[in-house]
Amino acid sequence: MVFSSVLFIFLFLPVFLTIYLCLKKEWRNAFILFASLLFYFWGEGRYIIILLICIVANYYFALRIERSSLLDGNRMRARRILQYGIIFNVLLLFIYKYTNFAVEELNSLLKAVQIPAISISKLHLPIGISFFTFQAISYLMDVYRGDVKATKSLINFGAYKSLFPQLIAGPIIRYRDVAGEIADRRITPELFVSGMNRFITGLGKKVLIANTVAAQADLIFSLPPESLTPGVAWVGILCYTIQIYFDFSGYSDMAIGMGRMMGFHFLENFNYPYISRSIQEFWRRWHISLSSWFRDYLYIPLGGSRCSNARTNMNLLFVFLLCGFWHGASWNFIVWGLWHGGFLMLERVRGGAVSKVLRGPISHIYVMLVVMIGWVFFRAETLTYAIGYLKVLFGLQAGAEVGEALSCPPDVWVAIVAGIIGSGPVLQALRDRFGGSLVVTDSAAPARQSLNLPLAGAQGIALLAVFLLSVMSLATGTYNPFIYFRF
């Protein structure tokens, strides 16, 4: 059951919100836990046991860390328990996400030396395991550092860990960012309405833009590179560049919106990354909860930028190697991570020279070129395919034109144009130009209200249209899950 499904939109979410809003505050966390576990069980069945084990184990680890550190004054014991907790979560992630990859690579080596291959049943990858294990590690480290107190309530911790808006594809919500609201939160009409608006915005991003360009990207990437022309290849990677941004930022918008309807304020996860003028800026704007996680819990503990240049560069490459591997168990993702890490290292070492050469629009072209080449590795099934695709992209190898792939339907071109425009802060600029927020607030001056009322009405009509078009598309379309579900 995904957010962009008729079942979720018209059954699960309204039933959940109706009961949730009618409950007393002291019962809401228990209901969140129950509903979130039901939501996960609906999609993963018996693998819910993995989530339950993760909840109970990390609840216990955090209490032991806090007790050893604060009550007993034994930091060494607290550190050891923290290490056990991190190892537990990493092992959980490795077993279910990387065992198949490790066995396949080992069998390739064994085949090369003519040794019989290892035969094991392929393990299922539980949805969201990459997110909820990283979330657990951040919680344990924050408790160890004294940034937050370990919650004594298993219900409250379970509600935090399993909170269904962010459970299966993020954002990676840190406990310290929502600790106060886990304990007590207030739902105002304004907050609830803003949550609805944000949810519909995300739904439109996913259904009307991401899904539309995805059909063309999937078609082109399903063809062998030697059958493509450079023009077709560029259309394919342009479509995927738009798809992955609107797919994932759409999911984040829906998660943030549902959080608001429940009384939570989740931090933003995207900030128009495609307007960046450096790869460093791109990673400050793209998947913010993940990039900040790697910064705070891996890069800085490794020494960050406080080390020698050589060590700092190695830290960057290592962190982005792991960032790529986190996304998927394949060499493609490793190359993608090293590709970004390499350019971050280049900008750090030769930042002055790069900024002098790459100014104005050229810097933006540079970023988009680097990002789009990276997306080829991200989207391709194999390294061989990615390299072949890049050769076609830059005219080093090309085949005959494939008419079916070259002729984009009109709705795809509309989605491409909408995606390009929507990748920048155009709506924000319009809000700033015509009087700030489109939503009338109690504190607004009368003149400001008269200016904003038509805009608020226009926004309401636009959101209603987006919602209706999205539902119509869902009712007539095919199942198209979010890209990050497989991570």
Image (cartoon, rainbow, N blue to C red):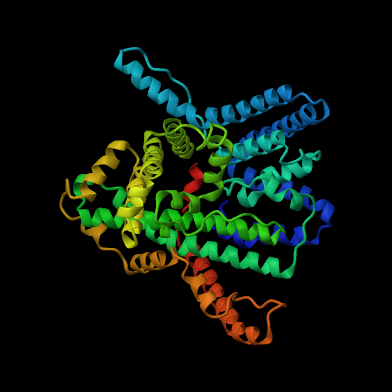
Residue 209, located in which quarter of the rendered image? bottom left
Residue 317 versus residue 114: which sits nearer the camera?
317
Q: Give percent across and percent down for residue 452.
A: 60, 82
Q: Does residue 66 appear to the left or right of 296 in the view shown?
A: right
Q: Horizontal placement of 356 versus 151: left or right?
A: left
Q: How many marks?
A: 0
Closer to the camera in the image, 329 or 452: 452
Residue 242 spot, x, y in % from top left? 40, 58
Splitting the image into 4 quarters, where does residue 464 fall?
bottom right
Seen in the picture, residue 120 relative to 384 is either above or below; the reply is above
Residue 143 visible in this rendered orientation of the protein = yes
- In the image, 134: left or right of 283? right
Spot occupied by residue 304 in the image (x, y as percentages of width and height) = 52, 36
- The residue lying at 65 percent from left, 84 percent from top is 449
Name the foreground residue: 177 vs 470. Answer: 177
On the question of residue 216 being in view, the answer is: no
Instruction: Using the rendered view, name the quadrant where residue 435 is placed.
Output: bottom right
The foreground one among 16 and 256 is 256
Residue 394 position (above or below residue 403): above
Instruction: Please tell me which residue is depicted at 47% across the width and 40% down the height of the picture.
Output: 327
Residue at x-position 45% and y-position 61%: 477
Q: Position of residue 151 (x, y in %)?
A: 78, 40
**Residue shown at the point (58%, 84%) measured from the top left:** 454
Compared to residue 36, the image places residue 116 above or below, namely: above
